[in-house]
Amino acid sequence: MIFRKAEKEDFYKIRSLYWNLINQEQDDPSFPHWKKGIHPSDEMIQNSIDREELYVLADGDEIAACVIANDEKVDGYADAPWQIDSDEVIILHVLAVHPDYRGKGLARRLVENVIEQERKAGKKALRLDVIENNTTAEKLYQKLGFRYIQTKTLYYDVVGEMTFKLYELVL
């Protein structure tokens, strides 16, 4: 399994990973309500690849897991009681593990690699939000050292207003 930045040729494999996950998980109440072609959109995936913000775990020619790491945040982040008051912060988005690779610790491995990458880049913290009832994701982030900050209603175009739990890892 190789950790690397996504490349242009990975686009369709990454989109397929998200779509397979949506097909399999859309009826699970803890699934974050992603929608094919809407979130993550083709434009979001392509732009993240172009800006070198999309990371993957590749198994040969297959993309087993991916995540976007950048500084884009929703308005609700501004007044959260974060531990670090800095612009040198990265937000994790749309972390996904292909259904065929579930249960192998790939989400953990992917996030650990991103933590190391961003630490080396001089970032001060990683932040993220988890849909309120996604306890599996919360347990993963807590094991990785992320600290619960606040439960908050956030607005995302794809789902509207929903309750999320905010987490932060000081690097």
Image (cartoon, grey):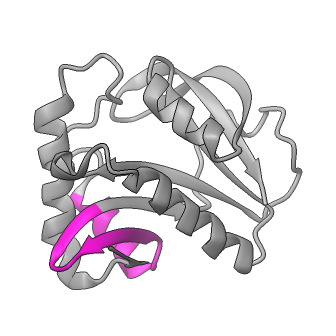
Q: Is residue 163 above or below residue 54?
A: above
- Residue depicted at 59% across the width and 41% down the height: 141
From the viewer's side, name the closer residue of 45 and 109.
109
The quadrant the N terminus occupies is bottom left
The residue most toward the front is 104
Task: Residue 71: name its quadrant.
Answer: bottom right
The quadrant the C terminus occupies is bottom right
Position of 60 with respect to 85 (left or right) is: left
Position of 150 with respect to 9 (left or right) is: right
Q: Which residues are magenta?
A: 42-64
- x, y (%) of residue 85? 89, 51
Question: Is residue 37 in view?
Answer: no
From the viewer's side, name the closer residue of 163 and 171.
171
Q: Is residue 145 above or below residue 121?
A: above
Q: Is residue 132 above or below residue 73?
A: above
- x, y (%) of residue 25? 20, 30
- x, y (%) of residue 126? 68, 54
- Residue depicted at 55% across the width and 27% down the height: 154
Task: Residue 5: name its quadrant.
Answer: bottom left
Q: How many marks?
A: 0
Magenta span contains residue 155: no
Question: Is residue 112 in view?
Answer: yes
